[in-house]
């Protein structure tokens, strides 16, 4: 019995329960504001249990695919609910759960305005994300891909900061518009496959064997690439990101930066590189150029910011440039580096957004000029902030360094000049990270500032867990390098038919 | 035509009989509730009888009517949508005691009769009669708001004149077609010996132009926003949904599902591009909700025309699903407008009047958002699957330019649909909307039913995908009229790996 559908459905089902529970409480007048919060915690704990069970199962077969689920959906179109899990999706789902737990522990409890709806939207975003990581039917993948946008849009537009609605519209239109191009690519691939074999199917493994002309594969690959590039984001199409990250409520910022951006990287691995290896390698130099542009441009803008969340947002653009660089370097080591970078960035930037949100809750400002030194008043918060800022600048021994180093190594083999330019981005990373540390944590305390409460032990324990994960990623990335890579297509394509046979 | 070879689909006599009963009832004593009940009963009877017919279809294919799955499907859509519209209008009609408005349900029944006759017709005669019955009763309905007399009359006059012009073009085309081909069959004319083929082409183009007028494709679209704004919201829905289904069904019946004649390809290409871009760009600059819905309806007709223009394996499913998605979502939007209208004073026309609806009335706000997302094509709504299918037909035939226009149009569309949702979320200082006047159980129920259809249709669209299209009329006219269309080839699907 496969647990994958439960893994996908549980969050949204829990979200509905949270919503209803909140409504009922309003009706009965019982003063327990955080009932929906409790439901969310229970849901996430259950989800974690499911994931632990799923992680402990032995792999189904040598190709690395760990679990499989199949159910016909729209038979006339050859669309099925097909979910498969390999090491890559499992690692990214772990990342998602960890960050969602952190969100719930840190920030969602403070939502008082229609908290039930908030938790419902939060958990349905999680369903969309997990579904995206698991779907191996292209229609289903697209369905989940679009599905996670709506709740995110409402989260930003309703619970965000001052300019939230414009940011939410920008976010939605960019992602949806590029998604339509991906839709055309999916349909194109399906139709070409249909012409060749007479079988109409959206199955990932069946479509992988489609024979394509060089031009055709390039066009289809670009359709996918644009959609993922907007999500990742890649430089010319990144403009939605700083606004969305800055204006979103803390929870949504963490989910956006920590997980949603990773769906872009995941999509590039699973659908660009695995489906169109040939077109990807031809497109590689362009994509690597875009990656370098992202690294330098994001880091440069990040140095200029006064808004703490904006600074972190631009630093994300820079870090995701490394992911793009690694993925399109054409070597296995580059992809491993990119995956490590994705995981490390998710943890460290997610944590930074949590800390920024906590600062905003306490000081009521995101402007670094207004915040002043927090170390004296809130040593725990500041210590954690310094740790993650340092992780984000690429300190050796921490996760981001491992990822960036592997990417640079892979890039050097392709083009030393590119590697030098990318490494220059690390210098800028040091500049903006240290500016952040200096201005927010280490500066002299502003006169007249009211000291807020520091992080309680429970929250510090959770942050400590994230720190440990970042350190492990940095010191001993080898298991992740072998475990979290995508499983080969050919093995599965050959074995998927018979592995379930009794 | 002699008595023994009359073939008449049952909904037509049922609707006619219902109309006459209503006329008798009105002549005896005016009572709007009784008229509405008669209307509902007639519609239900027509729905029940929709797949029945009197007489047998003539074997030589010269009948007036045809009853295949496409006709039945579109007729069901028409009847259901009118049923919804009757419920939408119910409250306003009953409350307006000082001003007896029995004409309203009466004209609505007549309009339904016209629309149904259009989808069942296999000859120019019933088609044109249907067009005219529908058009004339719509004119009366559009002008039915006595308390906004000036706007209503203006809209009705605009509709009368433009509808008259388009009918004239249609009629001229039909006359020409009859002249060159000697047949009244509802297919593009083939010039008989002794006539220039260009005459037949001119006739086809004129008929197409007349249909585009009724379909409000750009550049024949100017009347729709004005008319829908001046009409009461339920009638705006009637114009946008029922009339459009009827004319689109006839368009598909007329040209069949095969490739279009070469001389039409360029024209249709241009019209589709203009319709999608024009509709969306016009919608972008509206600040009245009804006008915005009118413009978005123009754009949706453009998307539908892509499917019409792309004959392939996916075409049938795409058209049926898209018609259904468009019907349900548009009806949903108008139901919610009706439910909130009087509370807003201006019939809910100004978009700014919807400010803060999420805070004051969460149910209409949420359902409205679902409907708008469906129109924009976002999962998990039926509109998403419909747009997916439309894109599929385009990809199948490699209509690259049209697909590009589809993407651009959808992005623009997304902006104005989201903008309404944004306005509804916008709290602001004072919610401009007082809490709904009275409980409206029938509108609430209708809204919920439509929302369920939208969501369930998005999750399980399979049943709506059966091949329903008429056979290619042009090549096999006889087969189309036998009442049993040829089975569409069943698609082979992937052999799936067995589940656990």
Image (tube, rainbow, N blue to C red):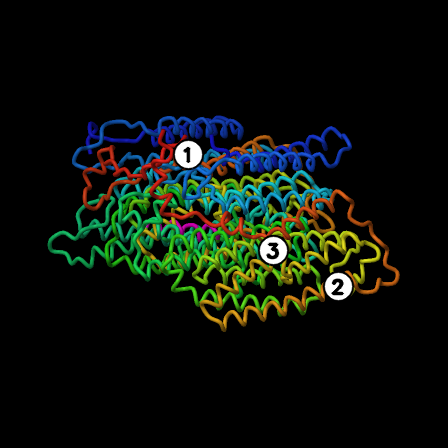
Q: Earlier in the sequence, mark 1 or mark 2?
A: 1
Say if labels 3 and 1 share a chain.
yes
Which element type, helix, strand or loop, lies under badge 1?
Answer: strand
Instruction: Give the mark nearer the N terminus: 3 vs 1.
Output: 1
Overall secondary structure of the magenta stretch? helix
Residue with the mark numbered 3:
A399
Q: Does any portion of residue A153 appear in the rendered image?
A: yes
Which residue is tagged 1?
A: A71
> How far apart are the two marked residues, 2 and 3, measured between alpha carbons?
26 Å
Name the residue beneath numbered marker 2.
A368
The CA distance from mark 3 to mark 1 is 38 Å
**Towards the viewer: B300 or A336:** A336
Q: Secondary structure at mark 2?
A: helix
Q: Chain of mark 1?
A: A
Q: Which element is circle 3 on?
A: helix
x, y percent for residue A236:
52, 66
Q: Which residues are magenta?
A: B296-308
Q: Magenta segment: does it hold A244?
A: no
């Amino acid at each position: 019995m496969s647990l994958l559908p439960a893994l996908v459905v549980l969050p949204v089902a829990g979200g509905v329960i949270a919503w209803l529970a909140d409504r009922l409480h309003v009706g009965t007048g019982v003063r327990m504001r955080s009932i929906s919060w409790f439901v969310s915690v229970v849901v996430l704990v259950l989800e974690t249990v499911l994931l632990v069970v799923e992680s402990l199962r032995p792999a189904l077969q040598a190709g690395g695919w760990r679990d499989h689920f199949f159910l016909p959906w729209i038979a006339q179109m050859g669309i099925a609910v097909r979910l498969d899990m390999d090491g890559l999706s499992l690692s990214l789902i772990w990342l998602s759960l960890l960050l969602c737990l952190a969100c719930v522990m840190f920030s969602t409890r403070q939502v008082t305005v229609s908290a039930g709806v908030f938790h419902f939207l939060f958990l349905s975003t999680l369903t969309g994300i997990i579904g995206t990581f698991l779907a191996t039917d292209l229609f289903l993948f697209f369905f989940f891909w679009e599905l996670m946008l709506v709740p995110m849009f409402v989260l930003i537009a309703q619970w965000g900061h001052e300019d939230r609605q414009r940011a939410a519209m920008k976010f939605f239109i960019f992602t949806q518009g590029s998604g339509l191009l991906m839709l055309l690519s999916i349909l194109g691939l399906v139709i070409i496959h249909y012409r060749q074999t007479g079988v109409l199917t959206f199955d990932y493994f069946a479509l992988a064997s489609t024979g394509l002309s060089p031009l055709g594969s390039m066009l289809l690959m670009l359709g996918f690439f644009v959609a993922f590039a907007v999500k990742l984001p890649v430089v010319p199409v990144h403009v939605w990101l700083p606004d969305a990250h800055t204006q979103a409520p803390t929870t949504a910022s963490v989910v956006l930066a920590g997980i949603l951006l990773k769906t872009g990287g995941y999509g590039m691995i699973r659908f660009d590189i695995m489906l169109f290896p040939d077109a990807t390698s031809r497109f590689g130099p362009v994509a690597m150029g875009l990656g370098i542009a992202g690294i330098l441009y994001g880091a440069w803008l990040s140095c200029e910011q006064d808004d703490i969340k904006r600074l972190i947002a631009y630093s994300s653009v820079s870090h995701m440039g490394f992911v793009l660089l690694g993925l399109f370097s054409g070597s296995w080591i580059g992809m491993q580096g990119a995956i490590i970078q994705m995981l490390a960035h998710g943890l460290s930037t997610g944590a930074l957004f949590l800390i920024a949100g906590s600062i905003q809750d306490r000081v009521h400002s995101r402007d670094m000029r207004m915040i002043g030194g927090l170390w004296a008043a809130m040593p725990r918060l500041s210590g954690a902030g310094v740790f993650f800022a340092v992780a984000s600048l690429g300190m050796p021994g921490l996760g981001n360094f491992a990822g960036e180093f592997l990417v640079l190594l892979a890039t050097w083999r392709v083009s030393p000049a590119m590697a030098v330019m990318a490494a220059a981005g690390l210098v800028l990373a040091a500049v903006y990270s240290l500016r952040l540390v200096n201005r927010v944590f280490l500066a002299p305390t502003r006169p007249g500032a009211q000291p807020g409460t520091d992080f309680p032990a429970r929250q510090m324990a959770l942050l400590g867990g994230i720190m440990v994960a970042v350190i492990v990623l940095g010191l001993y990335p080898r298991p992740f390098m072998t475990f979290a890579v995508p499983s080969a297509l050919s093995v599965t394509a050959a074995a998927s038919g018979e592995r379930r046979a009794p | 035509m002699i008595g023994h070879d009359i073939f008449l689909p049952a909904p037509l006599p049922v609707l006619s009989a219902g109309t006459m009963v209503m006329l008798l009832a009105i002549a005896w004593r005016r009572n709007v509730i009784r008229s509405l009940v008669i209307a509902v009963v007639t519609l239900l009877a027509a729905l029940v009888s929709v797949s029945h017919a009197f007489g047998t279809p003539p074997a030589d294919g010269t009948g007036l009517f045809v009853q295949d799955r496409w006709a039945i499907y579109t007729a069901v859509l028409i009847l259901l949508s009118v049923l919804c519209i009757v419920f939408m209008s119910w409250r306003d009609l009953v409350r307006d005691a000082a001003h007896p408005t029995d004409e309203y349900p009466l004209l609505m029944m007549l309009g339904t009769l016209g629309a149904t006759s259009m989808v069942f017709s296999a000859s120019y005669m019933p088609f044109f009669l249907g067009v005219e019955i529908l058009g004339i009763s719509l004119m009366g309905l559009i002008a039915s708001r006595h308390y906004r007399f000036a706007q209503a009359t203006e809209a009705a006059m605009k509709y009368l004149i433009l509808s008259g012009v388009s009918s004239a073009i249609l009629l001229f085309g039909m006359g020409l077609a009859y002249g060159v081909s000697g047949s009244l069959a509802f297919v593009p004319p083939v010039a008989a010996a002794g006539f220039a083929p260009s005459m037949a082409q001119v006739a086809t183009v004129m008929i197409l132009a007349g249909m585009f007028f009724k379909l409000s494709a750009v550049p024949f679209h100017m009347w729709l926003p004005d008319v829908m704004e001046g009409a009461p919201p339920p009638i705006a829905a009637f114009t946008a949904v029922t009339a459009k289904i009827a004319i689109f069904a006839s368009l598909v019946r007329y040209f069949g599902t095969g490739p279009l004649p070469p001389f039409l390809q360029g024209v249709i290409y241009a019209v589709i591009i203009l319709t999608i871009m024009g509709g969306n760009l016009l919608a972008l600059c509206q600040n009245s909700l009804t006008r915005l819905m009118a413009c978005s309806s123009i754009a949706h007709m453009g998307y539908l025309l892509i499917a019409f223009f792309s004959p392939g394996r996916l075409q049938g499913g795409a058209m049926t699903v898209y018609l259904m998605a468009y019907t349900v979502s548009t009806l949903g939007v108008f139901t919610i407008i009706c439910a909130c209208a009087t509370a807003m004073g201006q019939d809910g026309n100004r978009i700014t009047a919807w400010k803060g609806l999420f805070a004051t009335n969460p149910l209409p706000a949420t359902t409205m958002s679902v409907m708008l997302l469906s129109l924009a094509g976002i999962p998990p709504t039926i509109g998403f699957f419909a747009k997916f299918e439309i894109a599929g037909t385009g990809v199948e035939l490699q209509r690259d330019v049209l697909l590009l226009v589809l993407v651009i149009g959808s992005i623009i569309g997304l902006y104005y649909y989201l903008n309404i949702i944004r306005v509804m979320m916008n709290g602001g200082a004072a919610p401009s909307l007082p809490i709904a006047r009275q409980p409206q159980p029938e509108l609430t129920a209708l809204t919920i039913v439509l929302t369920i259809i939208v969501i369930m249709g998005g999750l399980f669209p399979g049943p709506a995908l059966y091949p329903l299209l008429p056979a290619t009329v042009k090549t096999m006219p006889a087969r189309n009229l036998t009442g049993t269309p040829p089975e569409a080839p069943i698609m082979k699907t992937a052999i799936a790996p067995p589940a656990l």
